[in-house]
Amino acid sequence: MPQTGTKCVSEEIQANVVVLADYALMYESHPSAHPTIAVKVTSPYGYTLHESGNITVGQFAFTTSEAGNFLACFWIDSAEKGSGVSVNLDWKTGIATKDWDAIAKKEKIEGVELELRKLEVAVQSIHQNMTFKLAVQPVTALVCPCREAEMREVSEKTNGRVAWFSIMSLGVCVVVSVLQLWHLQGYFRKKKLI
């Protein structure tokens, strides 16, 4: 982390998603004075979701109310500006925040059934994420339908250029052949072979 200034981390998250994060100050060397940090987490619209100062460890949790980039910013706020300081951040969203051990005990499931439940929730999460991505980018989808269409267009342009290059190459070969024929006719007439 820089001694002055702020270090920020952002993640694009859709609405109604649980977010859980743990953070801790890590010292690369063992300084005599331990600096402390401050943290501020903001929503895409600038609302403060978590703010804390003069700490070395902490956590925050919230459920998103709007979709967008959520920002967590860290800075050293103590008078002791230690060098070699970094922040360990464990940021979990969606299904990663679930306590599967507690769910297994509560519902009395284990083994394969628990793994199937995890996979089912993961598939639902992926489906919601894909739906969110398509809903966020409808305008760009109309302008450029998909990557396949872009690649097809590039391929068609390349094929057209190759066709024109081939025609030009053939034309150059014909012109060179005519010039060679003309030159050879003149040469053989000079030698009186024709």
Image (cartoon, rainbow, N blue to C red):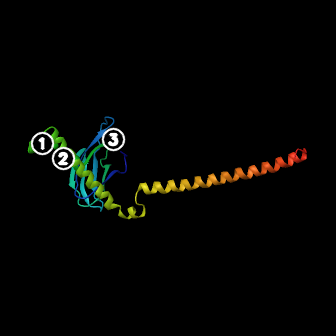
Residue at mark 2: 98
Residue in the image at 45% along x and 56% along y: 150
Residue in the image at 71% along x and 52% along y: 174
- The crowding category of the residue bearing disc 2, from other C-alpha atoms within 10 Å (few below 14, some 14 to 19, many at least 20), is some
Q: Which residue lies furthest to the front in this view?
A: 194
- The crowding category of the residue bearing disc 1, from other C-alpha atoms within 10 Å (few below 14, some 14 to 19, many at least 20), is some
Give percent across and percent down for residue 65.
Answer: 23, 60
Total labels: the figure holds 3
**Residue 14, visible in the rendered structure:** yes
Give percent across and percent down for residue 173.
Answer: 70, 50
Q: How far apart are marks 1 and 2 (CA)?
A: 11 Å
For residue 85, which numbered disc appears in the image? 3
Give percent across and percent down for residue 169.
Answer: 66, 51
Residue type at tag 2: Lys
Q: Name the foreground residue: 51 vs 49.
A: 49
Q: What element carries label 3?
A: strand
Q: What element carries label 1?
A: helix
- The crowding category of the residue bearing disc 3, from other C-alpha atoms within 10 Å (few below 14, some 14 to 19, many at least 20), is many
Residue in the image at 29% along x and 57% along y: 131
Residue type at tag 3: Val
Q: Distance between the residues labelled 2 and 3?
A: 30 Å
Q: Which of marks 3 and 1 is in front?
A: 1
Residue at mark 1: 104
Q: Nearer the viewer, mark 1 or mark 2?
A: 1
